[in-house]
Amino acid sequence: KMLRLLIPALLVAAAHGCGTPAYSAHTRVVNGEDAVPYSWPWQISLQYERDGTFRHTCGGTLIAPNWVMTAAHCISSSRTYEVVLGKYDMSVAEGPEQRIPVNPNDIFVHPRWNSICVACGNDIALLKLSRSAELSDKVQLGCLPPPGEILPNDYPCYITGWGRLSTDGPLPDKLQQALLPVVDQAHCTQLDWWGPIAIRGSMVCAGGDIRSGCNGDSGGPLNCLASDGRWQVNGIASFVSSLGCNALKKPTVFTRVSAFDSWIEEVSPFP
């Protein structure tokens, strides 16, 4: 583990391409603790302009040097956006940040997204950056899962983001992470869970009870360790229960990335 830190990060990025952070935590912590700085180097902050300053609204994932994946519900046509990469602590200027504007014509929301019906699915959007990000030990690409991949029940994944620490609670300065085991369709569609109407096959449920996503985490990644040792972004944070962010039997619901591989390739034909 320690040797990896000595390898120049660009060699790591070149050798592995995606999903291999230079800053690995020895133990991943649970229940919304501070992440190790830059240990999720594909996590971005989507920010919008208000009163001359940019403010965090959603998370997202850098999937190519000039493409970011986020949730459709994060996007409003009336707002001006920029993507901030290499960020950890929102309260300070840290140095490695890259702020890259997004032109309005370079925002691609899934054509079947319906803002009135979040539970109808298709909560995915792609943003083409106005210039390519500079990859480094603090800014790297997230891997996409194989097409159609469905993870088994209890598969360990991590949600990351700067979302609220509790329902209607405070926003953290530092990037948070929490272990969210996958809840498979058989469980999540049960009537006393989310039920069959709210949960589509193109979604993935994870967590529930004490650990969950919350407002501000939207659009961010559900990070799952693949068998080859790389992290894959299997989900995009989509919605939580109106009963609260950590309601019992109401796990956080994500857009299942592996259900949208053909659309992602169509919109962003990166190698």
Image: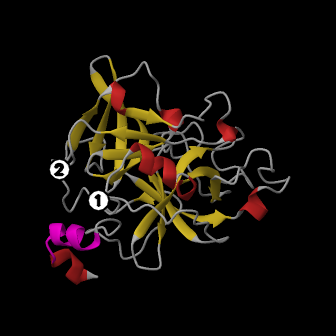
The range drawn in magenta is: 7-16
Quadrant of the snapshot with the C terminus: bottom left
Task: Tell me if label 1 and label 2 are in contact, CB under 8 Å.
Answer: yes
At label 2, which amino acid type do we have?
Pro
Q: Across the whole image, how many numbered discs are drawn on residues?
A: 2
What residue is drawn where x is 35% and y is 27%? 105
Write the residue at 56% across / 41% down: 123
| Camera-nearest residue between 161 and 120 | 120
Residue 228 occupies quadrant = bottom left
Looking at the rendering, which quadrant does residue 53 occupy?
A: top left
Residue at image position (19%, 47%) is: 94
Q: Is residue 195 above or below residue 23?
A: above
Inspect the magenta stretch and tell me whether residue 11 lies in it.
yes
Secondary structure of the magenta portion, mostly?
helix
Q: In the rendered structure, which amino acid carries the disc numbered 1? A: Tyr
Q: Residue at x 20, y 63 (%)?
A: 137
Real-space Cα separation, disc 1 to disc 2, in angstroms: 10 Å
Q: Helix or strand or loop: what does disc 1 sit on?
A: loop
Any part of residue 174 in sight = no
Q: Which residue is mark 2?
A: 96
Please check the rendered image and state whether residue 153 is part of the magenta-colored stretch, yes or no.
no
Q: Position of residue 144 (x, y in %)?
A: 44, 61
Quadrant of image for the N terminus:
bottom left
Q: Percent position (x, y) of residue 254?
A: 59, 51
User: Label 1: how many residues lie within 10 Å, few (<14), some (14-19) or many (20+)?
Assistant: many
Find disc 1 in the rendering and name its residue: 38
